Image (tube, grey):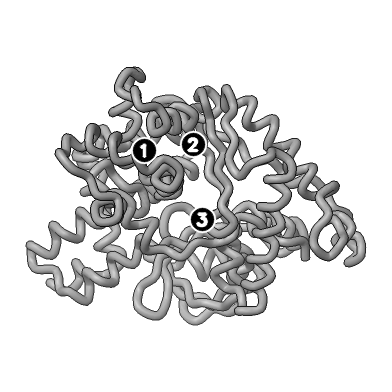
Amino acid sequence: MAEDKYTPGALKERLMNFVTSGRFNAEFRRAVREEFGDDIIVGDEEELINFVDWFALERRTRGGRTPLEIFVERERKRGMPEDVAQQLLRWGDVIESLFEVRKKIDPDTVLAYDHLRERELIIKSNIPGFLSEKAPPGYYLIARIVPWYDHYYLSGSSTLFSPEIKEQLLEIAEDMRRKYPELAYASATEEERERLAAAEEEMYRAFVEFFGDDEVVFPTGREMAKKLKEFTRYHIFEHVQANGKTLAQEAEERGHKAQMPEEAPYPRDLLRAKNVGVLLDPVEGMFLLPEYGTFRRIFADPDFQQIPGWRELIYNYLKEDSIPPLPFKRMVERYPQGARRVFKAALNRRRFNLKRDFPKLMRRYKRNWLEKEPVPTVIPFR
């Protein structure tokens, strides 16, 4: 019976009890405000379940670790076998996708096709009979799944669709591939990755043509949203690529009509923010950064300590997991003397050596970014 507590179902139940026990209340409220712009989750029961699942498995706390990682550390001290701990940590690599059920293996296991990553995989459910009763072959699932050895388990809430709306679902999958390029990149061949890299470079050229620089600061988030929509139109219909064609012309040659992509809503806090920066790197992609104008001024101005809230802003940029090392790297490259002054003052150091100490600072606060491979932020028309 002792081994039963290490089954995926039992582990998930214990993890969720740990996460909802009250220990993470402040972190959870902060995550809700960032996602929904308020202290209330605006959505249905399914959205609530998946938000809590995301928080438990993927959301990094201010300490830099996810609730999952903190749970595993506690369980190791209580005797959890190391192989179980390693598999449990893999749950942080959540896959969210459209899956087509192709074959029933047993009442709780199916062979499914991931339409975003274009591969087959084996999916299991912790709820007895759920897959066999609710998801027969030919049906579709929009679901979150987590790895466990050589297969996957459903995690969070799943939405089931009948084969009658297959065409609409495949359109949704293609739209998701465009919104989340890392999905396409994960399953791409070397040749496809080269094509994606070329498309990223073209977007970079278009951005610099349109804005005159590879970073631009807007007075408000709403102004940023408006100008990025204008840039997207320019990128698709007006920017002439190295091959002498626009993206729209390429699509038409393949029998498609180029359209403006569906707009994903920006977080309310970002729309309300001031001095919002848009940074574009030909390798690392595009980033939207609140108060980037002030952040940049801190490094450029010798009297930066007169800028209200300068220290807090530097620490917010360091600690916020969604902000990459890129803005710090640009400041070091453009204002090396200013960077030394700012880091010495912010960190209360007598000395700060950019060559030696800056990489250590990034490893401390931005390790997750340094350890993952950059992926394109644009997917070419098929």
Give me the residue at 17% from left, 35% from top.
348
- Three-letter amino acid code of the residue under disc 1: Tyr
Asked whether disc 2 touches disc 3, contact meaning CB atoms under 8 Å apart, the reply is: no
| CA gap, disc 1 and disc 3 | 35 Å
Q: Is residue 33 left or right of residue 224?
A: left
- Residue underneath mark 1: 317
Decide: marks 2, 1 in contact (CB < 8 A)? yes
Residue 79 horizontal/vertical position (percent): 8, 68
Give the residue type that dot 2 points to: Leu
Q: Secondary structure at mark 3?
A: strand
Residue 375 placement, left or right of 108: right
Viewer-closest of 133 and 233:
233
Earlier sequence position, callout 1 versus callout 3: 3
Q: Secondary structure at mark 1?
A: helix
- Residue that numbered label 3 is attached to: 158
Q: Residues within 10 Å of mark 3 (few under 14, many from 20)?
A: some
Assign the C terminus to one quadrant of the image: bottom right
Which comes sooner in the sequence, label 2 or label 3?
A: 3
